[in-house]
Image (cartoon, rainbow, N blue to C red):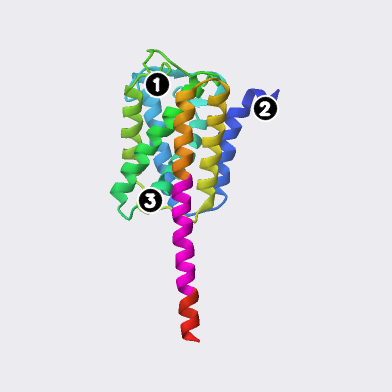
């Protein structure tokens, strides 16, 4: 009964805790970015901007300003994963912010249909063309994600596994739920995200092994 009632909330907090268990200085900045995302939702619930008019159900537990505290954990998990992936693809922080913000929009294309459908986490007061989600929501996600990441001043290394593994677990969870409930477009977005993750991971492993081979060759020459 407890897990049935609070399972979604616990899932978010546990996911955030797993990332935080492996400390890195950039995580403090990402937590700040998550708090900006949380604050934007308080504004969103009250005034309908920048996401459109919506409200949360009681499913995620205690709230501030109509927004569940668990959403701090949700923003932290998603931003950590998006930033780790994006900052591993480019040396430019500005480009990384752009890529991470686009990745956050892709997340929402997967998550929102599941959240308002089978999970019943929030309700849109004005229906939109994508599973009932208004298009302005996705523009809001991009804008808030980009602005929040302006406060993140360093990359999250590709070898920081916690953010990566937790992010993939969250993606897989929502893809499975989307498939089980016939949300095929949302599930397809999630499948593409997982595919992109696999390609990025393969690139990182190639770079890692190439660097390892160079170190071994250098040691052999020194001998």
Does residue 149 sit above or below 61 in this rendering? below
The residue indicated by pointer 2 is 3
Residue 194 in percent (x, y) is at: 48, 39
**Crowd tier of the residue under label 3, counting other residues whose Cα lies within 10 Å: few below 14, some 14–19, many 20 or above:** many
Tell me the SS state at disc 2.
helix
Marks 3/2: CA–CA distance: 35 Å
The residue indicated by pointer 1 is 45
Main SS class of the magenta portion in the image? helix
Q: Residue furthest bottom?
A: 223
Which is nearer the N-term, disc 1 or disc 2?
A: 2
Q: Quadrant of residue 112?
A: top left
Q: In which quarter of the image is residue 7?
A: top right
Residue 87 numbered tag: 3
Which residue occupies the foreground of this view, 147 or 135? 135
**Crowd tier of the residue under label 2, counting other residues whose Cα lies within 10 Å: few below 14, some 14–19, many 20 or above:** few
Q: Quadrant of the N terminus?
A: top right
- Residue occupying image coordinates x 45% and y 67%: 211
Tell me the SS state at disc 3.
helix
Q: Give the range drawn in magenta.
A: 198-215
Residue 134 in percent (x, y) is at: 36, 19
The answer to whether one can see residue 112 in this image is no
State which mark lies toward you, 1 or 2.
2
Q: Mark 1–mark 2 contact, CB under 8 Å? A: no
Does residue 133 sit above or below 173 in this rendering? above
Residue 210 in percent (x, y) is at: 45, 65
Does residue 1 sit above or below 222 in this rendering? above
Question: Is-magenta flag for residue 88?
Answer: no
State which mark lies toward you, 3 or 2.
3
Which residue occupies the foreground of this view, 114 or 18? 114
């Amino acid at each position: 009964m407890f897990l049935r009632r609070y399972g979604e909330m616990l899932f978010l907090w546990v996911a955030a805790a797993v990332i935080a268990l492996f400390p890195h200085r950039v995580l403090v900045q990402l937590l700040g970015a998550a708090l900006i995302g949380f604050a934007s939702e308080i504004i969103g619930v009250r005034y309908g901007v920048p996401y459109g008019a919506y409200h949360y159900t009681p499913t995620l537990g205690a709230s501030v300003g109509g927004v569940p505290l668990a959403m701090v954990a949700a923003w932290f998990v998603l931003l950590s994963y998006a930033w780790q992936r994006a900052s591993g693809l480019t040396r430019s922080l500005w480009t990384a912010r752009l890529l991470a913000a686009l990745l956050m929009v892709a997340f929402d294309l997967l998550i929102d249909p599941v959240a308002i459908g089978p999970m019943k986490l929030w309700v849109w007061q004005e229906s939109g063309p994508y599973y009932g989600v208004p298009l302005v929501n996705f523009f809001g996600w991009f804008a808030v994600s980009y602005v929040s990441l302006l406060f993140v001043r360093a990359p999250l290394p590709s070898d920081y596994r916690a953010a990566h593994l937790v992010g993939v677990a969250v993606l897989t969870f929502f893809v499975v739920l989307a498939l089980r409930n016939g949300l095929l477009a949302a599930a397809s977005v999630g499948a593409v995200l997982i595919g992109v993750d696999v390609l990025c991971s393969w690139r990182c492993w190639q770079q890692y092994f190439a660097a390892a081979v160079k170190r071994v060759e250098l040691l052999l020459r020194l001998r």
